[in-house]
Amino acid sequence: MSTTATVDQGGEYSTSGPGSNNNSNNPLRVFVSAKKDINDLFIKVETFVKNVHEFYRSYGDDAGSIVSGGKLQQLESAVEKVAGIRDVLSRNHMKVAFFGRTSNGKSTVINAILQNKILPAGIGHTTNCFLQVEGTDEEEPFIEVGGHRQAIDSVKNLANALNNESMSSDTLVKIFWPKSKCSILHDDVVLVDSPGTDVSANLDSCIDLYCLDADVFVLVSNSESTLMQTEKNFFLKVKEKLSKPNIFILNNRWDASALETDSMELVRKQHMTRDTDFLVDELAVVEKEAAEDRVFFVSARETLFRRTAPLENGASLPNLASLAQGHETRYSEFEDFEHAFEQCLSQSAVKTKFSAHTAEVSRLTTGLAALLEEVAAGTARLRAEKLATIRAHRETVAHIQKAFQLLHQEVKQEIVNLMKAVEHKVCTALNEEIRRLAVLVADFEQPFAGDAQPLALAAYKKELHGHVEARFIANLEQRFASAVSCNVGATQAKMLEGARRLLPPGTLERYSLLGYSIAPREDFKVHIHLNCESLCSDFVEDLQFRFSYGLVQLLQYLTGGKVGENGGNRSLMDKSFTEGKGVQLPSNSSINDSGNGSGSSGGGNRSGNGKAMVVQFAASNLDLIDKLSSSRTTITLLAVGGCLVRVIGWHVIAITSTIYGLLYVYERLSWTTRAKETAFKRQYVAHATKKLRLIVDYTSDNCSDQVKNELTSSFVRLNRLVDNVIEGLRKEVVVLEKEVAFLDEQEKTVALLRGQVKALTGELQAFTGKYLL
Ligand code: GDP
């Protein structure tokens, strides 16, 4: 047999079997206590479910990777479900529904139980709708019909309100009575009075609407008549809806039996037999041996009187002299009825109201416990994954740094090598081009105005600077620019490849997509900076005529100086410019017809015109003539010399003087604009060569610097990219470390929650053991 928790007067719980008589205290407190316990428990459950929900949500995007999908929705519905159950639980109460024919005394019974004349009763009043009496924490009573509240200040007022003809038999009027004025209402009991089984046309719907949640049904019959079929029909319908309703039968108006003492026991027996038969055989809601405990013979009017009549002179009871004989027994039986239905009510209500919800929440907490297990395992797994990623990132950073250091050394060496190669290449090319400068100058074909027109000569010079500069640069660039660009490109590609090897796969592509410029520049070109105009700004041409065999020149020659070194424009000396150095004059000139600039000293320079032949002839006899030619001073000296060789004879002197004079005339006549141009170009070449040689080192350094800058900037870009990658990985590590720290906290929280769910499961089991088993 199961035991039931009860509360004694001191508020302490004790257990006793159902129907135990020693439980004379208020059994309704069991329900009140159970309701408080389960409400407290459900507050904890609701808080817990919300906490789990919040906790799960705190995983954010990781939630999906921690546990299988759909859990968030499950938790959300669990939160709603628990809130819903808590709401129902908080509104739960014990409900007693009273049925019976009109005027059997239902309202009087309810008033007697309430110990207050709350419901209108008596002749002239018929309850023609459903009345529900429940407690309110407010000080003043009020009614509620169809959700509309209406104040009542007296029973008469209530009677008037209830007499409203528009109220149909299936209307529910809720009467809220201050709990402070009525102890049973204080204990969460709701009493429902029905319009009477004989007047309620729509019994079915009324049972559905107002009675299905009743914990106890009381049939108030009139002991002056037998149980009517209409009354039986009602309970048969209730039986159809509820499998085993708790039904009590009150044979009211038993005070009437006091007048017929002889037949009273017989009548009682007949009523008892009919009633128990109805309960046991027709309704099958109670066992035969317990059936008599559900049937009572009472007088509601006497009980009401005893409980509500005014007391006189401080008496504890009103004057009961007016009551019929045996009223004490009837009152005692009414109390027995009250105790029995209260106990039954409390037991039934606790089970029906709380067991389903407790089971539901028990399933829920079991599910939550499983979820938390899963979350704990998922958290540990995710934490381990993140730690592994952190380790991998750190290793990658260390590897990148080390490998990049090596790449840096390699690239540095590569740059140095390339710079040396470029320097050498540029140096060689420059020297070669300088050697070929005469060809460039000879190719300049602007008309030469000579020194007679200084402005035109200045313009000519400017043009020549431009010509030499452009051709010189173009030739140099042609020689090495593309090769150098190729080398630079190859080195850059090597850098990129090195970076690709040391970075995680796809990094370069990803950064390239992000707009990082890491590819080598395709338009890189080594630039030669040359400004002939400023380089040769100090060039001053000397176009003065000087006789090649003047005394000064001869002395210079004899003392080892170079003939025509200063002037350099003598036509006989021009031969060395055009032939000796292998430099070609302009191809259409009378001197140079080969145009290849190779400068053969042979017949390659022969001109087709006579002037050229004269030059040729002069050139072929140069040694002899050169030694004999002189200026006017020289002539004087020769005259003096002639005196000295007078012994040789005048004819020798005359012939020599004539030849010398002819030579002078010839040279003077040959000093034409063309000869001047040739002399100008030769002087320019000599000057420019000297100047250009000065800048060979500078230019080759400059070119190798350009290469160095290009490669260095490429490497710097690459370095920046690698730094960015490392920075990115480090930032990821920081984020991951935070996530791991978060997961550490989550692990602590999940352990806490697992402890809480265990405690809640224990509390639920304790509640079940205390109230529901
Ligand atoms: P209801 O229609 O079933 O609610 O019946 P009421 O409570 O209104 O009672 C109808 C009449 O029966 C009233 O006049 C009551 O005073 C009277 N009455 C109720 N209970 C008893 C009782 O136990 N004995 C006697 N003699 N009259 C009662």
Image (tube, grey):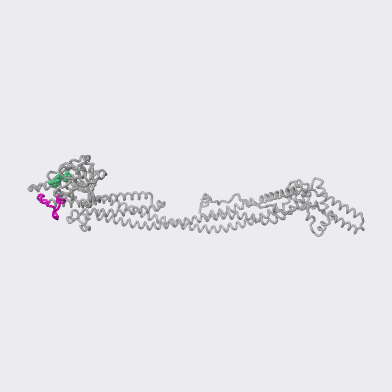
As rendered, which of 674 and 708 lies closer to the eye? 674
As rendered, which of 104 and 438 lies closer to the eye? 104
- Characterize the magenta stretch by its predominant secondary structure: loop
As rendered, which of 527 and 501 lies closer to the eye? 527
Where ligand 1 lies, by quadrant?
top left
Camera sees residue 228: yes
Residue 679 relative to residue 704: left or right: right
Q: Residue at x 29, y 54 (%)?
A: 41
**Quarter of the picture holding the C terminus:** bottom left
Residue 309 forms part of the magenta stretch? yes
Residue 681 relative to residue 11: left or right: right
Q: Quadrant of residue 406?
A: bottom right
- Spot occupied by residue 765 in the image (x, y as percentages of width and height): 28, 55
Residue 772 forms part of the magenta stretch? no
Q: Residue at x 81, y 58 (%)?
A: 556
- Spot occupied by residue 427 in the image (x, y as percentages of width and height): 67, 55
**Quarter of the picture holding the N terminus:** bottom left
What segment is highlighted magenta in the picture? 305-329
Q: Quadrant of residue 171?
A: top left
